[in-house]
Image (tube, rainbow, N blue to C red):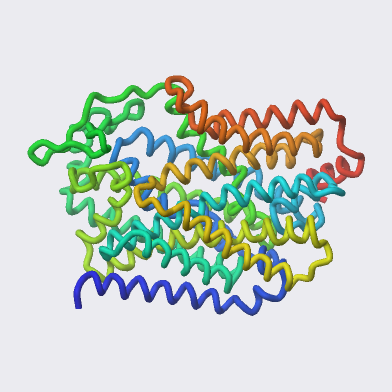
Amino acid sequence: MGDTTQIMLTMIAYMLVVIGIGFAFAKRANRSSDEYFLGGRTLGPWVTAMSAEASDMSGWLLMGLPGVAYWSGLADASWTAIGLAIGTYVNWLITSKRLRRYSIKAGNAITLPEFFSNRFHEKTPVVMTISALFILVFFTVYAASCLVTCGKLFSTLFGFDYVPMMIVGAVFVLVYTIIGGFLAESASDFMQAVVMICALLIILVTGTAAAGGLGAVLDNARSIPGFLEFFGAATPVTTAEGVQEAVNGVPQFGEAARYGVLDVLSPLAWGLGYFGMPQVLLRFMAIRSEHELTHSRRIATVWVLISLTVAVIIGFMGRALFPTGLTTASEAENIFILLSTHLLPPVLAGLVMAGILAATISSSDSYLLISASAFAKNIYQGLFHKTASDQRVLWVSRITLLAITGIAIIMALDENSVIFTIVSFAWAGFGATFGPLMLFSLFWKPTNRAGAIAGMIGGGGMVFVWNLLVRPLGGAWDVYELLPAFIFSSLCIVVVSLATGAPSREIQQEFDDVRAGR
């Protein structure tokens, strides 16, 4: 049996296990929309922590982040990882318990738009509708990044065309999500978080040995200008088509690029995104007891620190072992696949490749399910058919899943898409649209409905404006759009809330009750 066949069979076996988990939870998931979308708030601390981080990290952890480290060195990858690690810890520390308590107090909300709407006692669901629409937009972009990961994985491994492989991945994720709902998603995400970190550690150990030790990897990195600097970046010499040049098998680099304060703040700003990530915030709402969140925070933080650190090192290792193996920024995201297939026996390589598939599945099912709930629960039922039955809502959610997947497939048709770039835009969108509003809703009593609307529109709109119009100007304007959009959203919430009057006495009393733990 050929190596490729063994890898394929191992990955198919893994996918069958994931589908089995979906069927195991199918009956319970279909009892009600509460079970389907939030699992009846029954998650334990381990599943809460591991599923949150697996759904958060997605395929970019095993492909995007090592690809950045392989292409330009330490600075971009490490500052991004540091920002994410800090954001993870702080989000679990200050947001999780307050949100768990507040989501129950606010009409037992089971989706993020429903929480925001109930938090401000809406009679006309404007906040709910705006937040649901932003979720649909940004999660469709996010889902597209996952499909790009699937397409690159299967086409690189098996030599098939990118587009058919991307569509196969989309169909698999769609079927799995439709079957099992939130509980199946969370249970499989727990398993996939274990697979992801094991895959990273296996490649770390085997790659270090193949490269002649960690010292050899670092020596190679030091030989490249700017590659191993926190305040500099390597600059591959490329052709007009973006292909790195090589002379006698040696990849060519120019002078190290300068890395100033704004260059550091941009990747660090990734950490701000956590306060607005629906796939993480929903886990806070779904845990069975807020008192278990401390345990979850410790698990999540350790998992994130290990996985991010190893992912960056793998990028360095790949540059030492395969210096000219990947010659464009897009191809660089295949370094994890290249290392796995060259260093491991086929069955083990298949299990490691399942790590990438695990990362993709664990994220895309979350994105699709949350998007479907935003439309079915918050727009269809909340806005147009308030008396719609639970079964009708579930059917609408499944139709929505089909539509979103179709749009994501169209967005993912370009195989030269850079996963890291797609994810960064969607991450900024969620972080700026919902992050400030979440923090102000939980911790600033004067926040009112008008401020919430202004904050979401201002933050989400600024992501598009900064990314498309301002950032291309370069220089001091070349700042990751999440940072200015997050600040602008916060200002909108404060200014509009103060200008339009205090919230009602009932809303303020509810805020005080939650703050006091009542």
Quarter containing the N terminus: bottom left
Pick the front one: 27 or 307: 27
* Residue 95 spot, x, y in % from top left: 66, 45
Image height of 97 relative to 437, above or below:
below
Q: Residue at 75% of width from left, 53% of height from top?
A: 114
Nearest the eye: 484 or 42: 484
Q: Residue furthest left?
A: 248
Q: Residue 126 at what x, y percent from top left?
A: 78, 45
Q: Is residue 219 visible?
A: no
> Residue 451 in the image: x percent, y percent?
77, 34
In this picture, residue 245 sits left or right of residue 502: left
Residue 397 located left or right of residue 101:
left
In the rendered image, the residue lying farthest to the right is 505
31 over 56 or under it: above or below = below
Residue at horizontal 30 percent and vertical 71 percent from the top: 8
Q: Residue at x 58, y 70 (%)?
A: 178
Count of all numbered marks drawn on residues in the image: 0
User: Which of 241 and 365 lies nearest the eye of the viewer?
Assistant: 241
Percent coordinates x, y for residue 436 in the rendering: 66, 37
Is residue 91 visible to us here?
Answer: yes
- Relative side of 309 to 282, left or right: left
Asked if residue 159 is positioned above or below residue 99 in the image, the reply reads: below
